[in-house]
Amino acid sequence: MLDKKSLRKKVLAARDSLTWDQVEANSVKIAEQLFALPQYRAAQTIMYFLNFGKEVLTMKMVPQTLAHGKRAVATKTVTKERRMILSEIYDLEADLEPGLWGIPEPKAEALRPLEPTEIDFVIVPGVAFDLQGNRLGYGGGYYDRFFPQLREGVPLVAVTFELQIVKEVPVDPWDRRVDFIITEKRVIDCR
């Protein structure tokens, strides 16, 4: 099995080889499956990671979530404290700006903080996933520190491209599995 650093490099290189047309088309398929998920339909407050690079285009999902009558939440990174602030999003254009590493995040003047206990459904970023729901993140540990603050039973849902599914992800004791993985081809129930 590859170590985390090698696996991260290999999968990111594969993902970066996708064309923008593939990223767009696959993201549409992923969004359709996400919105059909019973756990999404039952949730009222949806937390998103906002896409960066050739990640699944979650920024296009936020307006749809708002149109579904749900609350959309994004994160602002506090690097000194290695934590995230949750903020409700009303309008992508008015509320966001490039943050850490150029990743979109809420502007300071548009912060509408929420407690992690208000979240009903989390859309989780990651570099690679295995069929057991193990997740390889980007290495900052922000989500691993955040997950324990959620209410028990809140679904953790990875939206990712099929080429990011690997045979095995190396895990540490603090790593938390996701409940569902949605790719352009399937929905994997990891519970």
Image (tube, grey):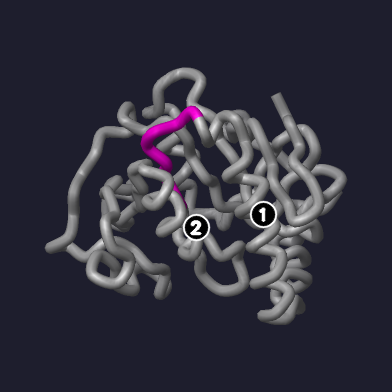
Which quadrant of the view contains residue 70? Answer: top left
Decide: is 164 above or below 123.
below
Q: Tell me the SS state at disc 2.
A: helix
User: Label 2 amino acid?
Assistant: Met
Q: Give the labeled residue for mark 2.
A: 61
Image coordinates for residue 181, horizontal then vertical, percent: 69, 42
- Left or right, 150 with respect to 24, comes to left
Which of 78 and 89 lies nearest the eye of the viewer?
89
Part of the protein shown in magenta: 42-48
Q: Looking at the image, which residue sits at the far left?
A: 109
Q: Looking at the image, which residue sits at the far top?
A: 152
Image coordinates for residue 153, horizontal then vertical, percent: 51, 20
Which quadrant of the view contains residue 53? Answer: bottom right
Which of 116 and 137 lies nearest the eye of the viewer?
116
Image coordinates for residue 39, horizontal then vertical, percent: 56, 30
Which quadrant of the view contains residue 76? Answer: bottom left
- Left or right, 123 with respect to 73, comes to right
Decide: is 110 above or below 145.
below
Quarter of the image containing the C terminus?
Answer: top right
Q: Residue at position x 73%, y 81% from top?
A: 19
Q: Residue at position x 38%, y 68% from top?
A: 104
Which of 148 and 110 lies nearest the eye of the viewer?
110
Q: Which mark is residue 21?
A: none
Q: Residue 88: within the magenta?
A: no
Decide: is 43 above or below 64.
above
Q: Tell me the SS state at disc 1.
A: helix
> Which circle's residue, 2 or 1, is located before the other in the chain?
1
User: Label 1 amino acid?
Assistant: Ile
Q: CA distance from mark 2 to mark 1?
A: 10 Å
Q: Give the labeled residue for mark 1.
A: 30
Which of 143 and 6 lies nearest the eye of the viewer?
143
